[in-house]
Image (cartoon, coloured by chain):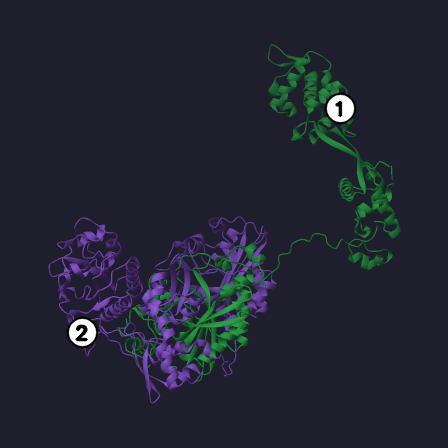
Chain colours: A green, B purple
Amino acid sequence: MDIDVKNLHPLEVKVLRHVSLGEDITAERLISELDYKVGQCNQAFSWLSAKECLEEKSRDKYVLYELTETGLDQFKNGLPVEKIFNFLKSNGPAAMPEIAAALFLEQSDVGSSFGQLTKAKAAKLNEERKAQLISDELPQDVKIARSLMEKASTAPIRENTLSAEEKKAIGALAKKRGAATSTFKLIEKEDVIYVLTEAGDKVKSDLFKANITGEEFGLLTPQMLATGSWKNGSFRPYGLNAPTSRIIPGRTNAYGDYLQWVKDKLVSLGFEEFDGPLVENEFWNGDALFMPQFHSARDIHDVYYLKDPVHCKEIEEPWLSRVAKAHEDGGDTGSRGWGYTFDHEFTRRQVMRSQGTVLSAHQLPKASIPGKYFGIARCFRYDQVDATHGADFYQTEGIVVGNDVNLKNLLGLLKMFAEEVAGAEEVKYVPGYFPFTEPSIEVHIKHPKLGWFELGGSGIFRPEVTKALGLDCPVLAWGLGIDRMALMHLGLSDIRELFTPDIESVRMRRGN
Amino acid sequence: MPKIEVSEKLFFDLCGHSYTDDELMDIFPVAKAELDGHDEGTIKIELNDTNRPDLWSAAGVARALSTYETGKIRKYDFFSSKDETKDSGNRMIIDDPSAVGIRDFSIAFAAKGKVVTEDILLALINSQEKLCFNFGRKRKTIAIGIYRSSLIQYPVHYKGADPDTTAFVPLHFEEKMTLREILKKHPKGIEYAHLVEGKPLFPYLYDDNGRTLSFPPVINSADVGAVEVGDSDLFIEMSGPILDDLILTASILACDMSDMGFEILPVKVKLPKETKYGTEITIPYYFQSAPDCTLEEVEKKMGEYLDDKECVASLGRMGVNAKCDNNVISIICPEYRNDFLHAADVTEDVMIGHGLMNFAPVLPSDFTKGNVSPAEEYARKVKTLMVGLGFQEMMYNYLGSRREYVDNMHISDEKVVFIANPMSENYEVVRPSIMPSLMESESVSGHAAYPHKIFEIGKVCYKDESDNSGTVTKNHLGFMYADNQVGYNEAASLIQTMMYFLKKEYQLAAVGEDGRFIPGRCAKIVVDGKEVGLFGEVHPQVLESWGCGVPAIMCEIDLDMMH
């Protein structure tokens, strides 16, 4: 094993420098000669053995008996049996409860101790059912116990130093575990003797060569700075690859970071952010976007309705009348309309916003020409929640308003999004369908990792949408499916993970 | 969006040649179609245009592809129009006024001359289902029945019939049932009962001999209404309340069947009331109109000048007959379509016919100034502070259960917005506060190392009568700090630090009854005399409801009131 002596811990260094080939190395020796604690000995032995600088020569198992707290008390104040013997000796026969009360002993202890005395023919129960001594001498086993306590009061007793009689007596008074109420605690121990290996000896000489003593400075302290003592020695080099401890930092959310990056990207391209309420009505959520009121995407199985209030109070004029007219016969939008009677009650019905395009519709009456707007809007759909559908999710949408904007600009915009936001290698446009745009275009991109997929939908708002909302110029509308890229960015595959409440998983999450 | 499955053999026969999958993927966009799968003789196609029901069949897609490739527009000579009525022989259907207000109209055409094969039968059933489900809103506005015309004695009658005395043997059953019994016993009756239940009379279709054709929109009869492989004479009928939708449906089916080799036979319909077509109409009937479109409009929308020849040729590839005089393009809407509402719709067909790849992308040239919203700007400021204070930003769903948002929080539901049609009780309530989201995190994160310091800046929504919607959406900050030893003092210090850096003078005031906090250990934050938020020690009853075993403090602030 190749060992860099600079990486050795001071506990290892001091041991190696202290010992020589052929010597027995024990914990006892390190404690007395190097002033180590037991724990430090164990560390030094375990590290140096692992480095093959020390090896085990022998291992000797033995048993120790040590006085417990109770035992120490009994050594000073007497065992219950001694107390009872002395009590009876000085006071004459007495009833059990009387003894217990006088000596502050448990009835059961009195009982068992008396049993011990009667068994050794030192006491008996007289005719009055009182305890009475019949010997002046304490039983032999009690005398042995007393001598053992005396011996143990200076240092723990090694089992192999005891006679057979003493072993028997101490066995009755000791326990290995739960020894709190026993006199002695039984401890199983091992004496291990180590010796220095050839490799260890080589490391030792390297240590001397490098002049490493194990007395190098550890932590630099304010005191060392104050006294200047740091000048009188050298600093111990640390193991550079030691395991690190965990830090839990304050952090932003990785998905939020991605959304913020998209927002900043769009702002840098000249887009202004818009926002709106989560509760919408059928008018803005669908009617204003020229979706016929009977459109299948407006079904009870697609949109969430509010339980209360079911309807909003009113829809702003003149937009209500103009949109209603666009649906019925086109009004002044140049369209023939859908040709049905617009339902003025249905239009006030409240829904949870189901598409981000609602924000674009709201923006139209107040849009500047030219103007570019975007929003990342939380939307709600009546969908079974699974790996690709959330109960609520973000949609990224926007519009470009300008007197001369056209299809070729839309394609240019999509190409820019594909390259700037999605990092696309190739871009492909295909005709699409959205009720509120004509023409409608889908943009498909070839992503370096995901391959071909649909990045988003777009189109030029139908005149039935823009003219009805008072805007007589073309409006390019687009939406980007950024969640798919967000998932890839975060190394996730389940859309539900984006909004996970699990603290640990959010803490550890990071983007690419 | 409609998805269809078509027989590969039938589809390629209708196209005139076969395609590889790659070729299909390349050409499908002209029909706004996507290849969804192709296995064992079946091609799966997804159609994106919900306003083009003519494309929801093998014949419809095949027609679009072959017209695009050949530029040859199909001709259908069986259409009547306001100028010409085709001979309907003795084929007639009489709509009785008794069905008006119940299911106003039933119209029909007949077909013969082609033996129904398994592929054709399947194709007919599929288009019938797609049209009824997607275009006819699950049979509400369109229900289609196909019958064996050899068993029919003309004229056919359509009326509102007594549901308890009118009876026949419905398809797939052997015993006679009254119309009302069908709604209770027949699977289709149970499925579609809601469309007729509660009406005094039920729609009923029968021939001149009194033989039942069907109980529209529910079920056909077991004999006349049981078309099988080998049949060749068919009667196709559609019923519903909107006449134009029925006529278009008939046109689509007639064109599809004509493409499959059937001879289409017109049927005269005696309408139950005066309509814009009068009281009689012969089906199939051409009723469509289309707007004109100028070359200038095309140029403005496309950003590129296409001359008259190119526009006309492009439209031809889309199956649209067009001519161009004095820079005005006039088109004849194909018999099976009715989606030209505006000149913009003509423009789109020009675009697809010309080929999207032939338009070069150009960036818009207008200069505009970009900006995040004021709310976003403020949120970013607060976020930076919270992160500096050691908090982890979280992001949550806004829909949850009553248990999470109300019961576990020990608050009243008075201001809480509920969904009327929740898909499950797990997504029934709109989040009125960020606190339950934070508690949910705590309840699922016992394994995460403490302390837990989390926050979110997000939206909440609750009732507010002063708003037009009776609700209000707000941007809130919520944070939670859970640890073995944490309490009011830590919360108050955090608020103090935050308010200092947000430059807000504030006072704290006692909170009345609030089940979320330990009484006497929570405070309102008042800025300029207005309550902007509150914070305090989370009440053990809340921790217990969420199954949390570690103390926590929480705070929520209305950020819209802060900037």
Q: In this view, does B158 lie to the left or right of B52?
A: left
Q: Residue under circle 1?
A: A148
Which residue is rendered at x = 81% and y = 39% of the image? Answer: A31
Residue toward you, A103 or A338: A338
Which residue is rendered at x = 62% and y = 59% of the image? Answer: A249
Position of residue A86 relative to residue B351, above or below, is above
Q: Position of residue A465 (x, y in %)?
A: 36, 77
Q: What amino acid is labelled 1 in the image? A: Leu
Residue A364 has which mark?
Answer: none
Q: Is residue B316 left or right of residue A205?
A: left
Position of residue B288 relative to residue B3, above or below, is below
Q: Where is residue A439 in the image (x, y as percent from the top left)?
A: 40, 76
Q: In terms of secondary structure, where does tag 2 sit?
A: loop
Residue toward you, B314 or B132: B314
Q: Residue under circle 2?
A: B86
Q: Can residue B461 be seen in this view?
A: yes
Q: Looking at the image, which residue sits at the far left?
A: B209
Q: Where is residue A274 in the image (x, y as percent from the top left)?
A: 46, 73
